[in-house]
Image (cartoon, rainbow, N blue to C red):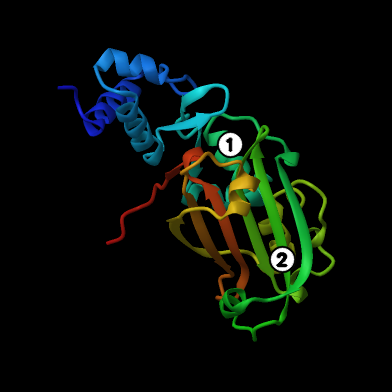
Amino acid sequence: MGIGYRELAEVLRDAVRRGDYPPGSTLPKQDQIAEKHGVNIKTVRQAVRVLEAEGLVTPVRRRGTVVRPRPPMKRLGIDRYAKSKWKFGGLVAFAADREASGREWKPTDQTQQVRLIEADAEVAAAFGLAERSPIYERARLVKDGDTPTHTLTSYYRPEDVEGTPLVDPSPGPAGQGGGFAVLTVQGLEPDSMTESFHSRMPTQEEIELLQLPGGEPVMILQRKTLTREGRIVEFARGVHSASRFSWSYTFKIPD
């Protein structure tokens, strides 16, 4: 009697993790797997679906079942926002991630759309404003080469950013040092930040925008940035492809 699909999934999973099938390679054809392990095609299909659900492989038309690449980039934690990077070195956060990952980057890896909108309930609450108050929205799509990695949409009070590079829709960061440097020039230097994360399955729009493989979740970021005096100067929401980042945090353990 042949093994079941769960046992077969375990065999294939171990082979992927050992590197028998490296990232970007394809698994053998399903009839070959069936013959090798003495099972029927239905069992192979069920086993492969288990690996798809776990995010190890994805079906690609005309190629077969492809082993997904491991996260190619670090997303730094506290260090990505170091003032030494953006205030003195002109290095924005996504570029700090790229450099830490040994990957090249260029300003046009980030595109954006800027518009004056009415604040939704979440944005209004973050700023302590009435719902539908005017707010600037700066929506970015960031790519690694031709591959989208994440979106980040920041919101600002109009009086804080009117007439600054933060409302310029040109591709790339908002000048040397990006948005934090712009806020500093406005007398609103970022000094503290709170980031919150959760995961969920993507919407159809997010699947298309981020070119996500089937079954891949997204990591949702919410970020609040405040001055030393406690004034919130930016609220941001991000959607990150889960397989394209590893999340890295280094910090001193509090007493």
* Above or below, comparing residue 85 to residue 158 in the picture: above
Q: As drawn, is 162 to the left or to the right of 154?
A: right
Residue designated by label 2: 137
Please name whichever residue, 68 or 224, is drawn nearer the observer in this view of the structure: 68
**Which quarter of the image is occupied by the C terminus?**
bottom left
Residue at 54% across / 29% down in the picture? Answer: 60
Q: Residue furthest right?
A: 163
Q: Residues within 10 Å of mark 1 (few under 14, many from 20)?
A: some
Q: At numbered mark 2, what does the secondary structure look like: helix, strand or loop? A: strand
Residue at 61% across / 41% down in the picture? Answer: 211
Numbered badge on residue 226: none
Q: As drawn, is 160 to the left or to the right of 59?
A: right
Residue at 57% across / 80% down in the picture? Answer: 125
Q: Position of residue 207 (x, y in %)?
A: 58, 47
Q: Is residue 209 visible?
A: yes
Q: At numbered mark 1, what does the secondary structure look like: helix, strand or loop? A: helix
Q: Residues within 10 Å of mark 2 (few under 14, many from 20)?
A: many
Residue designated by label 1: 98
Query: For the residues marked 2 and 1, what is the alpha-carbon distance in whole angstroms?
Result: 25 Å
The amino acid marked with disc number 2 is Glu
Q: Position of residue 68 (x, y in %)?
A: 46, 30
Q: Position of residue 173 (x, y in %)?
A: 73, 49
Judged by depth in the image, the label closer to the viewer, 2 or 1, is 2
Q: Position of residue 63 (x, y in %)?
A: 54, 21
Mark 1 or mark 2, which is nearer the start of the sequence? 1
The amino acid marked with disc number 1 is Arg
**Which quarter of the image is occupied by the N terminus?**
top left
Please name whichever residue, 182 or 157, is drawn nearer the observer in this view of the structure: 157
